[in-house]
Image (spheres, rainbow, N blue to C red):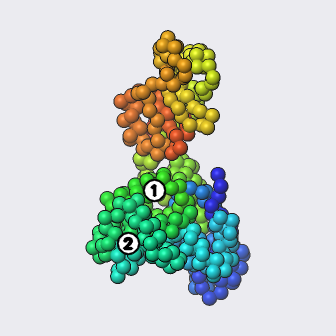
């Protein structure tokens, strides 16, 4: 997977003599010791990470952990003291003023906690503002603005003023303004934290919907566990300006790197955050590929199912995408009916489960239809299967680990 953002040995020192503070860090002094002796603040300390293209990468930490400073370093709202920030292979840390302006205008957008809308401009003009600054002519920028307002559900409010909108609607305008420039990288700093819980959930769902369609790279700062686990592909936990652990939500919950991370998630109901991809196993169900001779494929599949004492198999194409599910009985019926393709044996009652399906919904599916369920990603690629036994085992494991 290609890397959109690469951060190497990144530091930010706030104060009168950053180089002195850097020397003190190299001598092993802590952030608190440097502050006590010099009054300087270590905002970010030796950050190293990458963000993949199309990924939602969440920065988490307590207040003062450095997460907001770090995200502002990525687009040079804050200048780094030391280190590299590569965006699409270009080092933002050393980028000249004009190149930085071009990057912000054309390929990088930021959404803040405060909506930061211009009160004297309509929703349409607020949305088109970045394009106007970039010199796009009025007709083109307003067409683009209407397009993204439609995506966020505000097309009918294009001519309203910001003061006429609710907080949730204003944040949608802020998101639309960021999307209008069609950035490949979006930075979102506590973007939904000012909203009430219901509106926050709505915005999270909207973001995930747009992400499924557009696959942008997003760095998202949050202090909310539910939010981070719901939207994040990977999470970076920060403490005292340093990144202490990076991983998927499941990886961090299962294997916290130190006592800080362990305490950060103390009392968290792990089952609440498990999704289908965390439970799925590639060893649970037979996977077959369709060949030129459907009857030969079915006879071979039946033999393998009997040998492994299983009833069901999934058919996957050479591209890894799920095509359908079959059983011993459905393949016998298809052969008797002289079916010319394996698709003639596909079972209509076994349908794929999206990778992000939460455990509660997964349990409901298994209870209603006690057969192996195929789990697929957003491109319908097969990730594995979930069975009653596997699901029960996973829940027991999590229950036991919570009592350790």
**Residue behind mark 2:** 124
Residue lying furthest left in this view?
Answer: 164
Vertical relation: 68 (above or below) 353: below
In the image, 80 versus 214, the foreground residue is 214
Checking the image for residue 210, the label placed there is 1
Q: Residue at x 47, y 70 (%)?
A: 140
Between tags 1 and 2, which lies in front? 2
At a point 44% along the width and 43% down the height, the residue shown is 357
Q: Residue at x 36, y 35 (%)?
A: 364
Dot 2 falls on a residue whose secondary structure is: helix
Q: Position of residue 196 (x, y in %)?
A: 32, 64
Count of all numbered marks drawn on residues in the image: 2
Relative placement, left or right, of 108 versus 403 is: right
- Classify residue 5 by image quadrant: bottom right
Vertical relation: 395 (above or below) 125: above
30 above or below 271?
below
Between 167 and 182, which is closer to the camera in this rendering?
A: 182
Q: Earlier in the sequence, mark 1 or mark 2?
A: 2
Residue furthest front as drawn? 139
Q: Position of residue 166 (x, y in %)?
A: 29, 69
Q: Does residue 278 show up? A: no
Which class describes the residues within 10 Å of circle 2: few (<14), some (14-19), or many (20+)? many
Q: Which mark is residue 9?
A: none
The residue sitting at 52% across, 78% down in the picture is 135
Front in this rendered view, residue 66 or 70? 70
Please say whether residue 251 is visible from this viewpoint.
yes
């Amino acid at each position: 997977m290609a890397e959109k953002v690469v951060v190497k040995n990144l530091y930010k020192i706030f104060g009168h003599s950053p180089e002195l503070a850097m020397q003190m860090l190299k001598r092993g002094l802590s952030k608190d010791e440097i502050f006590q002796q010099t009054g300087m603040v270590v905002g970010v300390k030796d950050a190293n990470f990458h963000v993949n293209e199309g990924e939602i990468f969440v920065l988490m930490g307590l207040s003062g952990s450095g997460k907001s400073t770090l995200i502002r370093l990525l687009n040079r709202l804050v200048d780094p003291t030391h280190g590299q920030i590569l965006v699409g292979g270009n080092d933002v840390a050393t980028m000249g003023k004009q190149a930085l302006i071009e990057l912000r205008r054309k390929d990088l957008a930021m959404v803040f906690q405060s909506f930061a809308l211009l009160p004297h401009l309509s929703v349409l003009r607020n949305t088109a503002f970045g394009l106007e600054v970039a010199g796009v002519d009025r007709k083109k920028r307003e067409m683009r603005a209407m397009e993204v307002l439609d995506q966020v559900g505000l097309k009918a409010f294009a001519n309203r003023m910001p003061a006429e909108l609710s907080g949730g609607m204003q944040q949608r305008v802020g998101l639309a303004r960021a999307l209008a420039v069609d950035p490949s990288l979006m930075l979102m700093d506590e973007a939904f934290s000012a909203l009430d819980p219901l509106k926050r959930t709505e915005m999270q769902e909207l973001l995930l919907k747009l992400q499924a369609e557009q696959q942008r790279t997003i760095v998202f700062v949050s202090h909310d566990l539910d939010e981070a686990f719901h939207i994040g592909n990977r999470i970076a936990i920060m403490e005292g300006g340093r990144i202490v652990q990076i991983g998927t939500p499941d990886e961090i919950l299962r294997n916290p790197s130190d006592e800080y991370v362990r305490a950060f998630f103390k009392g968290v109901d792990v089952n609440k955050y498990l999704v289908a991809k965390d439970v799925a196993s590639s060893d649970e169900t037979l996977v077959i590929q369709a060949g030129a001779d459907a009857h030969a494929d079915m006879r071979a599949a039946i033999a393998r199912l009997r040998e492994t004492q299983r009833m069901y198999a999934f058919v996957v194409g050479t591209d890894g995408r799920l095509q359908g599910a079959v059983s011993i009985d459905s393949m016998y019926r298809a052969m008797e009916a002289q079916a010319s393709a394996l698709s003639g044996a596909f079972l209509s009652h076994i349908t794929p489960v999206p990778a992000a399906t939460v455990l509660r919904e997964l349990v409901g599916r298994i209870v209603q239809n006690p057969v192996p369920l195929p789990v697929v990603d957003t491109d319908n690629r097969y990730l594995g299967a979930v069975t009653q036994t596997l699901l029960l085992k996973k829940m027991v494991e999590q229950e036991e680990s919570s009592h350790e």
